[in-house]
Image: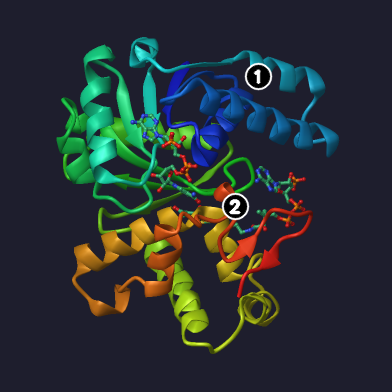
């Protein structure tokens, strides 16, 4: 693999571009608007700079990595990619539309992966012209730091496709865990119900934002409290994953908490909108409840 396309220049797309570029791959990043792409490149630059400051990366390697990333709004730029990783908004219709527009530009050999957190790989694969060359490649946030990549085969995924993305994940320094194609796979099948339960705990007045997060940080040794983590993931993404679990497994235990729904309806999506369970307007996050 030499050239990787990344669709969606949000927090995950920029993280994926970051680790691929550091590993020596050429990266072409596509999103809907130029300003989103400029923000993504600035974020990659900041995170690379953090690695340089901590002595984890040489400045020359940072500059070389930045030089390997190009951006644009046209899928035609992905025509010479060996693999395209889709990391756009967690919405099945959005992803299907992306694949419809993308595949006419790809070479017959190109592989397509999705970074979806929860949606059926089999169904997304069927929305492309190459279900055998389609796979789930689920990075964790923040991508440059987290060790895991979950790999998910759709029913149609060919072994060679799976082997190719496994090799890539290992080249990026990641450890692979293989999940079957069930709603939200492994990590989010376990993590998101916990986060949703934390929101219920808040909703029912069992504890404040601060007490819930402190309880789980100091009582269960989690690096972030569940509400802080929800804000970090994005409350829209958390809610989308809960809907996939609830619809896909038809069990009331996955019912999204009404407070989570309300926050998303208000446009309070967490860190990315500067407000969620915390307010990020100042120097330090302030709990909102
Ligand atoms: C929703 C899904 O589909 C799946 C998911 O991703 S679920 C989310 C999974 N992620 C988590 O659970 C993250 C939980 N949080 C953590 O592990 C930690 O809080 C954290 C690693 C994010 C930050 O750790 P910390 O100790 O508070 O911060 P800090 O000491 O400043 O940073 C630790 C490292 O992370 C890096 N880092 C921190 N935030 C970063 C970011 N947003 N982007 C890139 N790098 C970052 C730092 O540079 C530092 O790197 P080195 O160790 O190489 O020096
Ligand atoms: N957040 C997390 O912790 C994790 C998320 N994921 C998954 O990664 C994917 C992206 O999540 P994340 O980066 O957090 O989300 P973000 O909201 O940060 O970024 C999504 C990006 O996709 C863009 N986008 C939307 N529609 C299109 C389109 N048609 N073509 C190109 N780009 C488009 C959005 O643009 P605009 O803003 O203009 O709509 C935005 O820039 C999701 O599938 C999510 O489930 C996986 C692991 C962890």
Question: Which residue bears the numbered disc 1?
Answer: 66
Q: Name the secondary structure under disc 1.
A: helix
In the displayed structure, would residue 271 be above or below residue 194?
A: above
Question: Which residue bears the numbered disc 2?
Answer: 271
Q: In this view of the protein, can residue 147 be seen by the observer?
A: no
Q: Quadrant of the N terminus?
A: top left
Q: CA distance from mark 2 to mark 1?
A: 25 Å
**Rendered location of residue 42, percent (x, y):** 66, 28
Q: Name the secondary structure under disc 2.
A: helix
Q: Which residue is located at x 27 percent, y 59 percent?
A: 244
Q: Residues within 10 Å of mark 1 (few under 14, many from 20)?
A: many
Q: Which residue is located at x 64 percent, y 13 percent?
A: 67
Q: Quadrant of the C terminus?
A: bottom right
92 horizontally vs 215: left or right: left
Q: Residues within 10 Å of mark 2 (few under 14, many from 20)?
A: many
Q: In this view of the protein, can residue 155 be seen by the observer?
A: yes
**Rendered location of residue 246, percent (x, y):** 25, 68
Q: Residue 227: which quarter of the image?
A: bottom right
In the displayed structure, would residue 105 be above or below residue 62?
A: above
* Outermost residue, bottom side: 206
User: Mark 2 or 1 closer to N-term?
Assistant: 1
Foreground disc of the pair 2, 1: 2
Tell which of 273 and 193 is nearer to you.
273
251 horizontally vs 197: left or right: left
In the displayed structure, would residue 18 be above or below residue 149?
A: above
**Rendered location of residue 140, percent (x, y):** 51, 49
**Rendered location of residue 157, percent (x, y):** 22, 37
């Amino acid at each position: 693999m030499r050239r990787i396309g990344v669709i969606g220049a949000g927090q995950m797309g920029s993280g994926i571009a970051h680790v691929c570029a550091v590993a020596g791959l050429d990266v072409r990043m596509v999103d809907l608007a130029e300003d989103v792409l400029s923000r993504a490149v600035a974020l990659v630059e900041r995170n690379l700079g953090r690695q340089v400051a901590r002595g984890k990366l040489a400045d020359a390697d940072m500059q070389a990595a930045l030089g390997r990333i190009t951006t644009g709004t046209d899928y035609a730029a992905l025509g010479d990619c060996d693999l395209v990783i889709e990391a756009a908004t967690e919405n099945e219709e959005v992803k299907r539309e992306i694949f419809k527009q993308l595949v006419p530009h790809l070479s017959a050999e190109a592989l397509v992966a999705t970074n979806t957190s929860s949606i059926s790989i089999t169904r997304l694969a069927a929305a492309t012209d190459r279900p055998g060359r389609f796979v789930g490649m689920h990075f964790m946030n923040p991508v440059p730091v987290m060790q895991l990549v979950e790999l998910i085969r759709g029913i149609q995924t060919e072994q060679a496709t799976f082997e190719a993305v496994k090799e890539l994940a290992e080249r990026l320094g990641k450890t692979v865990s293989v999940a079957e194609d069930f709603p939200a796979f492994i990590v989010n099948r376990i993590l998101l119900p916990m986060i949703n339960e934390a929101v219920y705990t808040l909703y029912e007045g069992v504890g404040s934002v601060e007490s819930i997060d402190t309880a789980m940080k100091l009582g269960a040794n989690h690096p972030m409290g569940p509400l802080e983590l929800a804000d970090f993931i994005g409350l829209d993404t958390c809610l989308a994953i809960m809907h996939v679990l609830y619809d896909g497994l038809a069990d009331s235990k996955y019912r999204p908490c009404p407070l989570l729904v309300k926050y998303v309806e208000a446009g309070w999506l967490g860190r990315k909108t500067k407000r969620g369970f915390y307010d990020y307007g100042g120097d330090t996050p302030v709990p909102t409840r």
